[in-house]
Image (cartoon, helix red, strand yellow):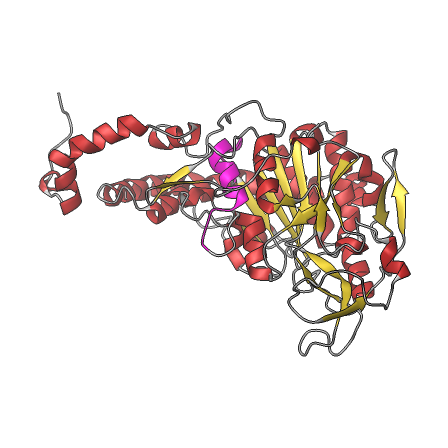
Amino acid sequence: MNNHPITTDDFILNRRDFLSRTGMGFGAMGLGMLFGAQNPAEAAMADASVSPMAPRMPHFAPRAKRMIHIFLNGGMSHVDTFDPKPELKKLDGQELPMDSLRTERPTGAGMASPYEFRQHGESGIPVSEIFPHLSECVDDMCVIRSMHADVPNHEPSLMLMNTGEARLIRPSLGSWVTYGLGTENQNLPGFISMCPRGYPIQESQNWQSGFLPGIYQGTYVDTQHTDIERLIESIRNDHTSLGRQRSQLDLLQQLNDKHQASRSEDGALEARIQSYELAYRMQMDATDAFDVMREPESVRTMYGPGVQARQMLIARRLLERGVRFVQVWHGEGQPWDNHDDLEVNHRRLAKECDQGIAALLKDLKQRGMLEDTLVLCTGEFGRTPTVELPTPGLNAGKINGRDHNHYGFSCWLAGGGVKPGHIHGATDEFGFRAVEGRMHVHDLHATILHLLGFDHEHFTYRYAGRDFRLTDVHGNVFHEIIA
């Protein structure tokens, strides 16, 4: 028996509805039963009674349940941080005896690192002097020295590292993770991207959801602000009570449902509907999560002063409250893109984030969270072992910086099942090209998904008649870095 009151809307069919409800509809039902949902996330999305952000299980038991991605924007120099090259010191100022590799701009002789490296911890991993605090954590870190990307340009390399695709719009890593796992706190976004002083290059494409439903896009927070109303715009409504807001939102939901009835495949509309609900719920939890003054003074002292320290502490507080993926940007305004004055600028940049990153690792470990939290720290590429020649508009005629280098660079991971106190791979004797244990960005993504419980080849989303995945048609899991 149908108790639905008949309205004129029931008799109005657009062309798509007409075809769906006639002969072609039977074919659509058959195809739907034949293909079915591709993974648990798609099954949940198909069930209207299940929240698209509800917690879900991955393909197999995960080593990590949540993730922090620290992005050192601009291209940190690996030969000045985590990949010491004694040969550069021997041949400082001399032409390097190696095959020429394409760089974005002309480079000259070899340039020795201006910093000293020392071995630390029981593992003896060497770290540059510019990271005195982080060097205390090397026994929990897995340093990858053999990363490589595709091109020496910021825009495509940022997109590759964040989305697995250098040119076309694709979902970001954080969007894939929240699509697959959901989140454990429905009153906060599942994916938050913190970047002080405005957007980085490529702006919100770095945390976009692409063709995934809009609910999985990262929520941007400008962490230069400390006032909650400026951190998250319109978080409070001083004119309407929560109960009144709920009534208004329920009415708006009814109107949106009616509007959506004939637009079921409109992802933008669905994202807008979900955003209203999330904005209402965030009034409860967001103020608490972003207020670091609620931490004991001893904890705030451990993280240190400044925006970067506050970002790292907020990241831990968000993970504690069930947020699945947090991205923390460093280097906006004055990024790690040091074409000149590298000695001064890399030291300054490291000082801004060193204590906060080290405190984050120590804090997570003390709270028993590091074992199931994956921490990744990377930029989009490395820098050349050769000095960059004078380039108008970049180095003001100075010859004391390095150009972009995608042939070989370093990143590091910690926690979440990675092998601690371990170095993987190597670049050549000068640090120009990855030569041992070469790991492409696609391989890094495949390994991250594996640690989170996903088979990257079967973790897909059907769009435009094709099953897409984060790693496209590439990528191998590097089991040698897994504990």
The image quadrant that residue 462 belongs to is top left
Residue drawn 71% across the image and 60% down it: 336
398 vs 372: above or below: below
What residue span does the magenta drawing correspond to?
A: 168-188
Q: Please give left or right for residue 474 compared with residue 49 in the image.
A: right
The quarter of the image holding the C terminus is top right
The percent position of residue 191, horizontal first and vertical second, equals 54, 42
Q: Please name whichever residue, 29 or 350, is drawn nearer the observer in this view of the structure.
A: 29
Q: Is residue 12 visible?
A: yes
The percent position of residue 478, horizontal first and vertical second, equals 64, 34
184 vs 77: above or below: above
Q: Please give left or right for residue 257 compared with residue 8 in the image.
A: right
Q: Is residue 339 magenta?
A: no
Farthest residue in the top direction? 1
Q: Is residue 304 visible?
A: no
Q: Please name whichever residue, 208 or 160, is drawn nearer the observer in this view of the structure.
A: 160
Residue drawn 67% across the image and 42% down it: 376
The percent position of residue 166, horizontal first and vertical second, equals 52, 54
Residue drawn 59% across the image and 26% down it: 62
The image quadrant that residue 320 belongs to is top right
Q: Please name whichever residue, 189 or 294, is drawn nearer the observer in this view of the structure.
A: 189
Q: Is residue 172 magenta?
A: yes
Residue drawn 73% across the image and 42% down it: 425
116 vs 401: above or below: above
